[in-house]
Amino acid sequence: MVIEGNTAVGRGGGIAIRASAQASLNDTALFGNSANAGGGVYNSGGTFSMSDGSLSNNTATTSGGGILHPGGTSTLYDVTIQSNSAGDKGGGAFVGSGEFTMYGGLLDDNEAANGGGLFHQGGGDAEFYGVTVSNNLATEWGGGVYIVSGTVGFYGGQFSGNQATFDGAKIGAWAGTITLSGTTGIAYADIKMDTRPTPP
């Protein structure tokens, strides 16, 4: 199935999942959708799962080009999040509260001002198992990942080719907790603390 070329004035260009709602996608491509936030997917308090699909070439004016997850539960299995963009935060994904988990897959070639691949802000947990974070671009901080608060963990997988104009090409951080375990191409020394007076 392909969900393509849709536009939302608010959130969730491709699909929007709200409190208590459930959505499950298998072998689905969300391509070329756009919204003010959450160009491909918006999950606010619902339960979302996706297997063997892709979020690609979606755009958000503000945050979450591929997916915006301010709350709820999102679980992705072997999903490619690629070539999405956001004007401000989280070109590939923006995670706030709740639980966000990826098993396998890619965060590749996404772009935003901060957090080209992933932007994490809030009290939620984001965990990535065997995920490749590659070739993402931040025009300010955090090419691969930017974290303001909350907990982010990478287990296995790899980082490569991420870039940031200011600093934190691999990971930029204001605060929060980051765990790296068996992830190649990155070390704790690669996490760069943001020196700006306020977080983005």
Image (tube, grey):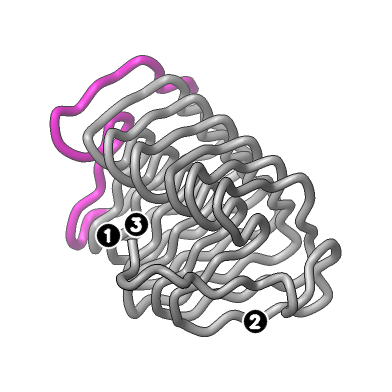
Give the residue drawn at x 62%, y 46%.
Answer: 107
Residue 197 visible in the shown view: yes
Q: Position of residue 195 (x, y in %)?
A: 46, 72
Q: Which residue is mark 1?
A: 46
Give the residue drawn at x 76%, y 56%.
Answer: 159
Residue 97 visible in the shown view: no
User: Label 1 amino acid?
Assistant: Gly
Of label 3 and label 2, which has the lower sequence position?
3
Distance in Å between CA atoms under marks 3 and 2: 20 Å
User: Label 3 amino acid?
Assistant: His
Distance in Å between CA atoms under marks 1 and 3: 10 Å
Q: Position of 46 compared to 93: left or right?
A: left
60 vs 141: above or below: above
Magenta highlight on residue 6: yes
Could you say whether the residue bearing mark 3 is in a helix, strand or loop? strand
Can you tell which mark lies on residue 69? 3
Q: Which residue is mark 2?
A: 179
Give residue 12's quadrant in the image: top left
Q: Which residues are magenta?
A: 1-21
- Which is more foreground, mark 1 or mark 2? 2
7 vs 148: above or below: above
Of label 1 and label 2, which has the lower sequence position?
1
Magenta highlight on residue 8: yes
Could you say whether the residue bearing mark 2 is in a helix, strand or loop? strand
Distance in Å between CA atoms under marks 1 and 2: 26 Å
